[in-house]
Amino acid sequence: DAMVIQNPRYQVTQFGKPVTLSCSQTLNHNVMYWYQQKSSQAPKLLFHYYDKDFNNEADTPDNFQSRRPNTSFCFLDIRSPGLGDAAMYLCATSREAGGGYEQYFGPGTRLTVT
Amino acid sequence: AQSVSQHNHHVILSEAASLELGCNYSYGGTVNLFWYVQYPGQHLQLLLKYFSGDPLVKGIKGFEAEFIKSKFSFNLRKPSVQWSDTAEYFCAVNRKFSGGYNKLIFGAGTRLAVHP
């Protein structure tokens, strides 16, 4: 089945130790998104790629970066995780960037910072 | 501030009860509206969407939602809930921002628990 896959599902890292979360898709969609979701809160968009064009949200901390080496893969890098970065990280894709296109979500990676 | 508001954070119902979850947004102009559902341990998935046309939208699993433009609302309804509807429900609005790209803005979610 075509889908959005996130690895790992659970990640524990130490305060200040860089961590990379992975997302892959078999949908061949042009757009890939990364969201941060804290407990009992709405998912918050961090950034997205339209093909190779990177779009960063204005309030996304510099600590968060992303790479999209090809259509299928997108990575979220947290350079120096703080305790406040503990959250669920969701990857999503959509065929195009227009408002009428549904986003397809992966299962998420739950990040714990110790 | 522009936002998406879901009125109830937690809803508890018995099976066969009717459900209505409120969603209001504060954006003017053209918007596309969505309800996503997240079942326990699973990923967010689309329940239904409104782009244009008939303001009453039918979704999967017997859900429907009504877009009322004058009230900036997109409430989710189901006449008779089942235990399997226990999940978290997110309302979302997709709108165009400067720079030409679209952004999905989520509400905080409503956690629904249905008791047998």
Image: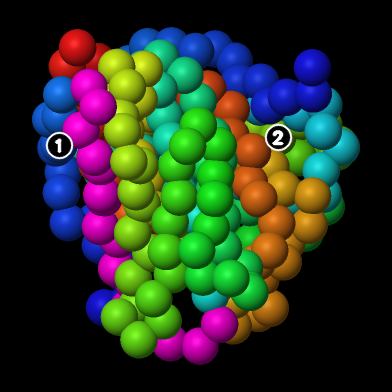
- In the displayed structure, does residue A12 sit left or right of residue A114? right
Image quadrant occupied by the N terminus of chain A = top right
Q: Chain of mark 2?
A: A
Q: Secondary structure at mark 1?
A: strand
Q: Report if the CB atoms under discs 2 and 1 are less than 8 Å apart.
A: no
**Residue B112: x, y in percent?**
23, 31
Classify A106 as above or below B52. Answer: above
Specify the amino acid type for callout 2. Answer: Cys
Name which residue lies at 35% across and 42% down: B78
Specify the amino acid type for callout 1. Answer: Val
Residue annotated with mark 2: A74
Residue B107 figure quarter = bottom left
Magenta residues, dominant SS class: loop
- In the displayed structure, does residue B8 sit left or right of residue B79? left
- In the displayed structure, does residue B7 sit left or right of residue A45? left
Classify B102 as above or below A72. Answer: below
Q: Distance of mark 2 from mark 1, alpha carbons?
A: 36 Å
**Residue A62: x, y in percent?**
45, 52
Q: Residues within 10 Å of mark 1 (few under 14, many from 20)?
A: some
Is B116 or A69 nearer to us in this picture?
B116
Name which residue lies at 12% across and 30% down: B12
Residue annotated with mark 1: B11
Is B79 or B98 nearer to us in this picture?
B79
Classify A38 as above or below B16. Answer: below
Magenta region: B15-30
Q: Secondary structure at mark 2?
A: strand
Name which residue lies at 63% across and 46% down: A103
